[in-house]
Amino acid sequence: MLDPIDGTKSFITGKPLYGTLIALLHDGKPIVGIINHPSLGERWTGAAGRPTLLNGGAVKTRACDSLARAVVYTTSPYMFATERDKAAYERVRREAKLAMFGGDCFAYALVASGWADLVIEGGLKPFDFCALIPVVEGAGGLVTDWEGGPLSLASDGRIVAAGDRRVHAEVLAALRDGPASRRA
């Protein structure tokens, strides 16, 4: 599966955070993923059962035990299609230590490299996310849908990538039902 220019808007406006995504799937599951950033000279490669590499050197996600300590990315707050999804993202943004916008596939590379903790997106297609899964998972993180289930070619495009399972669990609760019900 190929996304030749992930981050088309970045590309056409001269922002160097666009990339090329390449994924190899077996029985519909991504087993190899590449995030290539030609303008930065950086390439992340991930393969099932192997550590993720950045330009040949291993990278690892960082520990993050709570949303209050998390750096969370999304490409754009406008990518959430429904009012419910917008409100869910806004709950996460308010609880996070720092919320950042932009980056497209580069944000997932930041999670894999230990510079960011979460990426939350909506409306992605399989060519947008398949390559990201082996990269993030090979660095110690996980990528799921908003319910915590595995992504598939039929997924609805609502994605959570996390470097630490603890913050992943907390963000899923925030997306589902907000902070009040988690603390009750």
Image (spheres, rainbow, N blue to C red):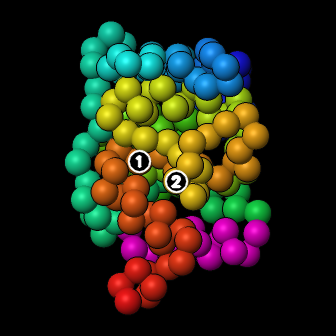
Answer above or below: position of 155 versus 132: below
Count the marks: how many? Answer: 2
Q: Which residues are magenta?
A: 82-98
What SS does tag 1 mark?
Answer: strand
Main secondary structure of the magenta stretch: helix
Report the mark closest to the observer, 1 or 2.
Answer: 2
CA gap, disc 1 and disc 2:
11 Å
Q: Which mark is on residue 148?
A: 2
Quarter of the view holding residue 59: top left
Query: Mark 1 = which residue?
Result: 162
Give me the residue at 52% from left, 16% from top. 32
User: Is residue 87 inside the magenta stretch?
Assistant: yes
Please report whichever mark, 1 or 2, sits nearer to the chain's N-terminal start. 2
Rendered-image quadrant of the N terminus: top right
Q: Residue at point 67% right, 36% down?
A: 152
Residue 130: x and y, percent? 62, 29
Q: Nearer the viewer, residue 110 or 92?
A: 92
Q: Position of residue 98 (x, y in %)?
A: 37, 63
Relative to 115, 41 lies left or right: right
Indicate the position of residue 115 as horizontal and vertical percent values.
31, 42
| Amino acid on which disc 1 is placed | Ala
Q: Residue furthest front?
A: 27
- Quarter assignment of residue 120: bottom right
Residue density around tag 1, few if under 14, some if 14–19, many if 20 or more, within 10 Å: many
The question of residue 10 being in magenta is answered with no
Q: Is residue 42 visible?
A: no
Image quadrant holding the C terminus, namely bottom left
- Identify residue type, mark 2: Gly
Q: What's the residue at 29%, 64% (across, down)? A: 66
